[in-house]
Image: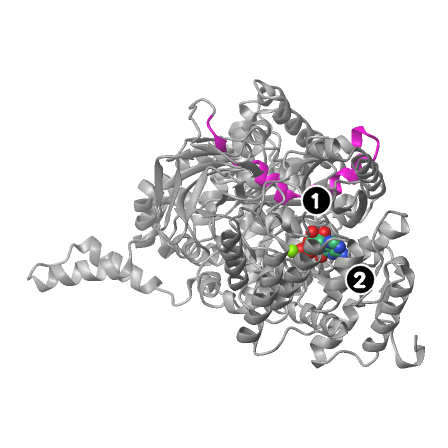
Amino acid sequence: MNAASGARLVFDFADGDRTQADLLGGKGANLAEMTRLGLPVPPGFTVSTEACRHYLARGTEPAELREQVTAALRRLEDTLGRRLGDVEDPLLVSVRSGAKVSMPGMMDTILNVGLNDHSVKGLAAAARDERFAWDSYRRLIQMFGRTVLGVRAELFDDELAAAKARAAVATDVELPVAALRELVESFNQIVVTQSGREFPQDPREQLDLAIRAVFDSWNTERARIYRRRERIPHDLGTAVNVCAMVFGNLGQTSGTGVAFTRDPATGRPGVYGDYLPNAQGEDVVAGIRNTESLDDLAGRDPRAHAELTRIMRLLETHYRDLCDIEFTIERGTLWMLQTRIGQRTAAAAFRIAAHLIDEEVITLDEALTRVTGHQLAQLMFPQFDAGTPATPITTGMAASPGAVVGEVVFDSAAAVARAAAGAQVLLCRRETSPDDLEGMIAAAGVLTSRGGKTSHAAVVARGMGRACVCGAEEIDIDAPERVLRVGDLVVAEGDILSIDGTTGEVFAGARPVVPSPVATYLEQGLDIALKGLDADAADLVRSVDRLLRHADGSRRLTVRANADTAEDAAHARRLGAQGVGLCRTEHMFLGERRVLIERLVLADSAEARSAALAELLPLQRADFVALLTAMDGLPTTIRLLDAPLHEFLPDRTELAIRVAVTEATGGSADPQDARLLGAVQRRHESNPMLGLRGVRLALVVPGLFAMQVRAIAEAAAARIAAGGRPRVEIMVPLVASVMELHLVRDEIDAIIAEVAERAGVSLRIPIGTMIELPRAALTADRIAEAAEFFSFGTNDLTQTTWGFSRDDVEAAIFVAYLAQGVFAVSPFESLDREGVGALVRMAAAAGRRTRPGLTLGVCGEHGGDPESVHFFHEAGLDYVSCSPYRIPVARLEAGRAALAADPGGATA
Ligand code: ADP
Ligand code: MG
Ligand code: MG
């Protein structure tokens, strides 16, 4: 190795370990780890992600890469005593992509690199199996042609199908040697006509071109789409693994398989896997022949099976988690080709975490790092109603849970188009490939007729949280004709099917859907939820309960609800809300009460105004009494009216037309209409979001806020009189300057004092403000003089910090912004830490400098977003407030955030 020429770019498997995924990619790091553990991994080496980054930035490989690959290759050849592509006894290798996180869209692995017209004969002689050698060679040309030279896969597939037809055999393994030789010839011909060049005969050239093709695959469209969706940075690059070949296609004592150390769909304990004799590489997941189970393997080859079982147990103990593995058996000898922490469904994540606690493999704290709020949200999805039984038209494999009723579509484009039109779609394919990614994203569920639980469809659907039934073999999917058939039943595109990804069942038509047991548990508690559940579902509910309770015990953030009505508040309370962080009062002025607002706006005298307000007062008071009853004993923050007044008035254009039409037809307009039109026109704003709303209303439209405050204070007094414990707080919206707050506070304090005095009770009602304008954040030290709490209104704070009008930009601008990487996720979905987050941190610190006991919360939609919850924890807030249905997610994430910040336990 030439140290002077720069960095080391190539690492033997024997040199690395699992911590080096940044440099070696996930696959390379885990191959190194297995090698380090002494497991039977074929030797090889990894070209680092750094080499890839260099290549992507400059368009050429780093100068030192060539000789480093040569050196590594020679070490490999010396270890095995064979030379790459040797004509007598060739060393063959696989070239495998492997980024830090596994990623569809990356280049497919090329197996059997090193074969050519000469070494194929050496391989046949060395293995004493001519069929095997020619099968390996045709696979190399096929994979190389497709992935390196860009030849369409169907051309090879069609040729293979034709060869099978000519030989009158059903599967590839039955093809005789002569047919395989002919295939090599016709594949070569396809390569020449399609790519304009010969398949390279020089083994080293094959290797170098394949490595470069892996680098290039980092930037394919599919890879980019996936990274965008998964928020993976575009500049990581991929590693390339070069691994000595072992052969599963050497007859019946050989084969290839994939396995999980636990069931990744349900989380049930016990190994799970698929095995395919006499096969190579991805045959086992591609659905070309029916696979066998690990039990079948135990019957076939007890020794290899025992070894595999021992290794799986060892890996699980070592990684302390569910692992998935790829293995090959070559003439009775087991080889490990890959392992990683396995993907799993949401249900499996909770159950496995709980089981691993019971098995004393991990602690409760660590278990909480193994589940996410996104997964909990998935478990809250509804399921098919067991009370309305239906007979499935067929049953496939339960690949990813969820009950989906959807409109049948047969390709990705149709899925995208129908979903965009608002339909819930079910993507039906024989099997899926990375080309179907966009369709799978658009679909609510995926149904395939081929492939097992580890097929592409199953793995990707699980990762995306889409329901999936795969390998429903009785279904004949005829995509060109746009129909599928099950027995006599014909289902056309646009027809409705229901699939259950938890059982694998497929139903004709739409089945009714009911709440999930986890949702029932969250709403009604453990005892009620457990009634009548089967063992798996009961285990799941208990696992969720256990982890959620641990999160509750660990978190520092409290979780409140955004709830505008007593019903919403009560619902939120059942879901674990510890208060209401935001009760919007806007809706209380709609419906039949709207005329009262109209009267208020039209009032031309103090008496008229008072009369209108006096009518609103008891209605408002009743709203608040109901709310405070539902939230008795818990903090309840009521926000004074925020919306612009014109939102409660008739539409300006409609009104103008009505008046104009009446006048044009010779009549004189209704005087009420004419006055309203005048008022509406006076109040018209070109940008209402930045106009007369929030605290500005209090200072411009006298009486309105006062009425609301009086209703709140009287409601609290009434609750006290009734023996309740109201803990109401009043929140003033859209404050930019402490002066605004001082002015309204004077009025608010006076009203509360007067109500308390008259009712003969003591009212303690904290008064605080939203921090939702940059100026408020910047002058938070001053604002805290007049505020007893801050609640960050992160929706408006995001709008005003970015200068985005949400309704306008989301549709028009965000697609381009996301595509071009201005941000990886919408700042309305997940808090923009750098910008809006900086204002939150600054205001929190400044507020607490002025008033050390200042309560800090957030009531924007970010309060229920998992990533944002972690930020609010770090920023030192006291609570997050979110929609009721997101409360369990916020509880779980707040617990996770506390543990992430202080892995030893919750912070004091
Ligand atoms: P992927 O990331 O798509 O799983 P892999 O690099 O793991 O791609 O390889 C694809 C298939 O080829 C897998 O089934 C793997 O086990 C198999 N494979 C890879 N390298 C070898 C090898 N050296 N010998 C035999 N099979 C291999
Ligand atoms: Mg693959
Ligand atoms: Mg693999």
In the image, is the residue at mark 2 within 8 Å of ligand 1 by its beta carbon? no
**Residue 609, horizontal then vertical, whole percent:** 35, 49
How crowded is the residue under tag 1: few (<14 C-alpha within 10 Å), some, or many (20+)?
many
Q: Could you tell me how many numbered marks the image carries? A: 2
Q: Mark 1 points at which residue?
A: 257
Q: Residue at x 74, y 63 (%)?
A: 121
Picture layout, residue 440 above or below residue 156: above
- Observer able to see residue 460: no
Q: Name the residue under label 2.
A: 24
Where is residue 739, by image quadrant? bottom right
Secondary element at tag 2:
helix
**Residue 735, horizontal then vertical, whole percent:** 56, 58
Instruction: Please provide the residue range marked out in magenta.
Output: 357-385
Amino acid of disc 1: Gly
- Observer able to see residue 668: yes
> On the picture, is 749 further left or further right than 358?
left
> On the picture, is 779 further left or further right than 898?
left
Which sits in the foreground, 790 or 46?
46
**Residue 370, horizontal then vertical, whole percent:** 73, 42
Quadrant of the image where one finds ligand 1: bottom right
Amino acid of disc 2: Leu
**Residue 495, horizontal then vertical, whole percent:** 35, 43
